[in-house]
Image (cartoon, grey):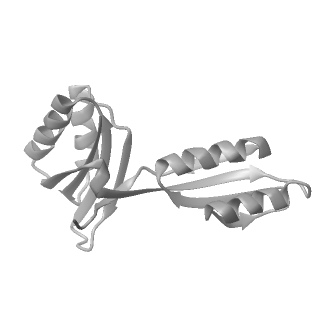
Amino acid sequence: MKGIFSVLVENRAGVLSKTAGLFARRGFNIDSLAVGETEDKDISCMTIISTGDERIMEQIEKQLNKKIDVIKVRRFSENKVVTRELLMIKVTYTNATRADIMQICSITNAHIADLSPKSMVIELTAKSTKIDRFIKLMQPFGIVEIARTGAVAIQRDV
């Protein structure tokens, strides 16, 4: 089971380290972690995705709520949340392959962020499953480098 947690925390030094330490001490795995400031510069939002059974998800929620820097913890259901990741991928190209790469980008709504004589940087914002598929599509062209964010999530209105 996948647990998606939105954790509002005080925006100050050491909070991320303390949160990661909690997961390490308890033996919980972090599959994805993204942190960013909210509309209030004194508050950050952590999106943490972890896997485990229901007991582990409950323990994660309880342990997060005990942290002094934590303002609010929300656990989202997978079917009631919108999640997105950002992928930046650098691939090599030749005159023969450039059009194929550009066509794949067009079909998948990926954008060419930078073009140099031998490689291009492509960005894609999507669900993690779509990003995984896009990476597989790019492998035959020659992947030079990949940078990928953790997922961010926001709850759907019901």
Q: Residue at x 74, y 51 (%)?
A: 91
Q: In this view of the protein, which residue sits in the foreground, 12 or 20?
A: 20
x and y, in percent, of residue 62 in the image = 10, 40
- In the picture, measured across the screen, residue 35 lies left or right of residue 97, that is left
Q: Residue at x 77, y 57 (%)?
A: 101
Image quadrant in which you'd find residue 84: bottom left
Regarding residue 14, the answer to whether it shows in the image is no
Q: Is residue 85 above or below residue 111?
A: above
Q: Residue at x 63, y 46 (%)?
A: 135
- In the picture, measured across the screen, residue 74 lies left or right of residue 81, that is left
x and y, in percent, of residue 8 in the image = 20, 58
Q: Residue furthest bottom?
A: 39
Q: In this view of the protein, which residue sits in the foreground, 103 or 123?
A: 103
Q: Is residue 154 above or below residue 51?
A: below
Give the quarter of the figure containing the C terminus.
bottom left
x and y, in percent, of residue 109 in the image = 61, 65
x and y, in percent, of residue 127 in the image = 47, 53
